[in-house]
Image: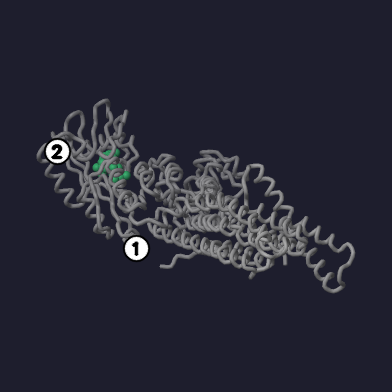
Amino acid sequence: MSNIIRALSSRDLLFSFICGLLLLVNRVVTWTAGPVPGIDLLLAGSYFFGGYYTAIEVVRSLRDREFNIDLLMLIAAIGAAIIGAYAEGALLLFLFSLGGALEHQAMDRARSAISSLSELAPETAHRLDNENGDVTDVPVEELVKGDRVLVKPGERFPADGYVLKGQSAVNQAPITGESIPVDKAPVDPKKLIADSEVASFPEHVIFAGSINGDGSVEMVVTGAASDSTLARVIRLINEAEKQKSPTQRFATSFEKWFVPAVLIFVTLISFAFLVLDEAFSTSFYRAMTVLVGASPCALAISTPSAILSGIARSAKLGILIKGGGPLEEMGLVKAIAFDKTGTLTEGRPRITDVISLNGSGEDNMLRIAAAAEKLSDHPIANAIVRDALARLGSEKLPEGSSAESVQGKGLKALVDGRITEIGKAGLFDNSIPESLINSDRELMEKGRTTVVVRYDGEYLGLIGLMDVSRPGSKSAIQKLRALGISRLVMLTGDNQTVADAIARETGLDEAVGDLLPEDKLDYLKKMVKEYAHVAMIGDGVNDAPALAGASVGIAMGAAGSDVALETADVALMADDINKLPTAIALSRSTRRIIKQNIFISLGMIAFLVPAALFGFATMGIAVFLHEGSTLTVVLNALRLLGWKEQV
Ligand code: ADP
Ligand code: MG
């Protein structure tokens, strides 16, 4: 009951009900008591309430010099009145306004699935004022970077940041779609993590809107609430909703000529009485019925409703899709290119081998390498810094400066004012000593990523690193195969041996190593030429150009990275590659529903126009079936809100 009251509080639905009620009273009185003076006033009222919103819509679109569907309906209703078919005209307005109002309600449901995201962040936060644990409750808008906030068990986190004290299992499903809570622990102050890096540590990072488990947690805020990952996602989804997909653009351009064509055709057949032996009113009635049957209301709503529902559903699964274009494109994907580091692998290599060339010593080499790599944010650089510091203890590193990354090869920097180069063998000219080349080859054969260190023109040695494949990669690849995606390729700048090793472990059929970023892009272009619909998945930071070169660029683990969130076409919020098959399956379901909807809407037009022409359908029936098909396509689209993966 309360549902009906709430629904009626929306004015379009209320007006539609009044329209229907007046029509009903008029009919009942006329049938029982015959013509009562003044009873037609009820129909006039019915016209008013039923036509009110349609007329407003028509005036607005005519001002923009557009013919829309509402115009067709208004013409049909006025036409019915002209030939004295008041009751049928009122019925048309009633069903049309009812259909429109229900359609709004349905679309609002899909939209509220999106806007409910923004209700996830709490309105106030318990800000810690001092070391004594005094707390003030403040509105989240007042939180600034560096604030410390207490979050009690079961509460929602008010801002992005990291854990300073306390441990808890945090449910971040609202942001990343991960169903299992993630254990969080305090940042070790000795670990030297910069604010910008926190996001790459899932055990410390906090996203606004996620729900605290059993432990009380003290967190440090790293950004304003309006700038949180959640806030960004909401902004991006709202943008996405406005982006038209190819099918939508097609439907819009179809309507552009279809609506005037219908008007011309209907005008012509309203003069049928000149040719056929019938009264003008008969011809006109038939024309108005055709007009109703030919109105592409259902067509207009078939794609947007499906896209809206698809985007809303995927957002709940931690998949941010930037509009109907990427959504439809993802459903078409035939081939996928994968980045290696951080996508198929953990992206957190460890140092496994340290080989010093001559007497200079391993620690000395690590010290110099770490000093330089501190200036880079490449996964290899992070690994070298972290592992070197662990080994050297709290020893102070030399001074590094003016770092310059050589894309896909390594890094050049000054350490204590001397030129320091770190990178794969290809970074150096052919001057690497024989023995170093041999050790390098040996390490690579063991599946290691290797970097050579040269300091002030002298080769210091070699560092071997190992990054393990993600536990989920293999099953994700299997699911993608099961979805019928025939070509799955890994593209990496790492050496071919490592590339092959990871490919074997994850079950990929192809791996291409030693690629520079521009080579990756070239390779991708070739794939696009061959398969037309190619996805590239990477971390969205190192691989931005390649992502942009694919038909659809997908970033993984985007919750922690603003760049990835903004640049990718599709962002998987969680660092979970198994969301990729999910995203593709959902896109395909969306495309299937769009196709069904277009079939239903065009099918109804194809049925109703001849039926009206040859007199099988009265205007009442035409209106009823017409509105029925419109509601059917919207409800069909809403099925996506409850979409579940079938694996
Ligand atoms: P990926 O395809 O794994 O993203 P990149 O193109 O980022 O690889 O890097 C390719 C190779 O270049 C790495 O495997 C490494 O050998 C070398 N390299 C890149 N950046 C650095 C760095 N900062 N320090 C050392 N080596 C690096
Ligand atoms: Mg990379």
Q: Is residue 198 visible?
A: no
Up-down: is 521 above or below 321?
A: above
Query: CB of residue at label 2: within 8 Å of ligand 1?
Result: no
Where is residue 462? Give x, y as percent.
Answer: 19, 41
Distance from disc 1 to disc 2, alpha carbons, whole Å, reads 50 Å
Residue pushed farthest left?
Answer: 434
Q: What element carries label 1?
A: loop
The C terminus - image quarter: bottom left
Three-letter amino acid code at the position of disc 1: Gly
Residue 627 spot, x, y in % from top left: 64, 63
Q: Position of residue 465 (x, y in %)?
A: 24, 47
Between label 1 and label 2, give the one nearer the viewer.
1
Q: Name the residue under label 2.
A: 357
Q: In this view, does 377 lie above or below 644?
A: above
Question: Of residues 143 and 378, which is closer to you in this image?
Answer: 378
Kind of residue indicated by mark 2: Leu
Residue located at (19% from left, 51% from top)? 497
Q: Foreground: 427 or 421? A: 427
Taking the view exactly as shown, the residue that stands out farthest to the top is 417
| Identity of the residue furthest to the right in this view | 37
* Left or right, 469 with reference to 66: left
Quarter of the figure that contains the N terminus = bottom right
Ligand 1: quadrant of the figure: top left
Residue 425: x %, y % from top left:
19, 39
The tag earlier along the polypeptide, 1 or 2, is 2
Q: Mark 1 points at which residue?
A: 484
Q: In which quarter of the image is residue 364?
A: top left
Residue 192 sits in quarter: top left
